[in-house]
Amino acid sequence: MKKLKIVLIILFLGVLFSACSNQSSNEEESIGETTDIEETVTPIETASDDIKIFTIEAVEENWQYTTDKVTKAWMYNGMLPGEEIRVNEGDEVELRFLNSLPVSTALHLHGLPIVNEMDGVPGVTQNVIQPGEEFIYSFKATLPGTYWYHSHENSAEQLFRGMYGAIVVEESTNKNHKIDQVVFISEWSAMVEEMYDESEKDGGEHGSTGGAHGAHGNGNGVELPHNEMMNDVYNTVVINGKAGADISGFVVKEGESNRLRFINSGLYTQTIVIPNHEFKVTHYDGQPVNEPTVIKNEKLLIAPGERYDIEIILNNAGAWGIEIFAEANKEKLNSILPLVYEGYENERLQINNEKLSTFDMTKYGQSQQIERINSVTKEFEMVLASNDGDETFTINGKKAPDLEVYEVNEGDVIKMTITNISGVDHPMHSHGHFFYVISKNGVSVQGSPILKDTLNVRPGETYEIVLIADNAGKWFFHCHELHHAESGMISLIDYAGN
Ligand SMILES: [Cu+2]
């Protein structure tokens, strides 16, 4: 059985690798870039005292997921998740990045409003950072919120191996929560790790491990689609770098104010179940919800790349377990994050026992007029589809390197209609821009304005979004299921004159 699985994974990864190795070399060609990109970075010597400086080193070290599971990981500053970058609104920030890995990489600052040169996309906004090289990422922390940084090179593998960390920009007001913590959700698989290691031994030639593009075979002529292959190999939920009973939770007191910042850095849409407590969803992708109301008995879905900040009303003392699981693969991908009141530390964790519906952000919070989004100047379509039995994923029938390019002018107000006609979720992430979600399946948003940088478009769904083109450059708009991105599901927002 194991041998069969290995064969399957070779095919699986072969397809991914061949897709991703083709991608970065040809993207440049398709969008008119040369290999060498002129980089303007602040020299270290001129950094003033007013700048908050963080040193981030990408390293290969062992990481202990559980008391008995140690693996070789690629991490930022030897930690999983990587060292948290926590700054105040208005701070000037410098991330001095050093690549001490045996492979090339680059750092994407996910969600943060930044200039194009800091976006960390090799071949588009910067040259890839070779082993031993440094790069300085600088930004002004203008907009409070929950963000994250992660690799944008060979990203399905590099995130899998541990290359992600949080960036928290704290508000100047309303910041004194007793508990304010990031919860990263991800997945791990011994089989996938083994395959990545094998491919390195083969000389690191992605694409050499097998596959031509085509359906995944199981050796008996039976084809397995992408999502079934995924469910076959990913078997461990990782919460803040730990798995199973080693997941570390929260010890709380009744009435304590709290802010839990959930970030999905993995590949699956995950479900979060807050057990037998009321809670509020205060932020989508770091941006505040207008007048969030208290809810109960609702499960929250969080897709790859998304963030949700929540506040739990702590009034039900006991030892509780927050369930976090991937509905598409619950049998293997499930976990418990402890939420334990002081005095209940030795009790057995209880999970939710109430009936749940699914949180609907289109009807949550208080509505509010956003004038700017009414004067639309351009309209685009984004049709998300798959070919070859979910082997390759496309946008408007195109895939990277021959990607869909949305040409815009600075000042445009862009209405984009996004439709998913494939059979799997596509969490679509826009670099350098937030967008307003204005309707879902033809029904206007009823509740709070929804400002996001990552929107999960599920099979059969249609959303209208409005994006204000106020940040010139070349920006990816891609699926954050990174296998899908590597198989081609990437588009580009390209400003005239860039
Ligand atoms: Cu996708």
Image (tube, rainbow, N blue to C red):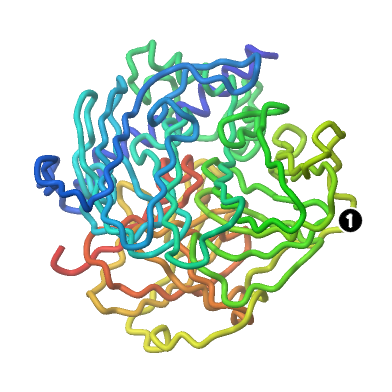
The foreground one among 3 and 497 is: 497
The C terminus is located in which quarter?
Answer: bottom left
Percent across and percent down for residue 337 are 71, 40
- Which residue in the structure is indicated by mark 1? 354
Percent across and percent down for residue 132 are 21, 24
Q: Residues within 10 Å of mark 1 (few under 14, many from 20)?
A: few
In this image, 1 relative to 284: left or right?
right
Point 48% across, 59% down: residue: 454
In this image, 135 relative to 415: left or right?
left
Percent across and percent down for residue 410 are 23, 75
Q: Is residue 62 above or below residue 445?
A: above
In which quarter of the view is residue 107 placed? top left
The N terminus is located in which quarter?
Answer: top right
The reply to whether the residue tagged 1 has its Cβ within 8 angstroms of ligand 1 is no
- Local SS, label 1: loop
Amino acid on which disc 1 is placed: Glu
Tell me how many marks there are. 1
In which quarter of the view is residue 82 placed? top left
In this image, 260 relative to 161: left or right?
right
Percent across and percent down for residue 128 are 23, 36
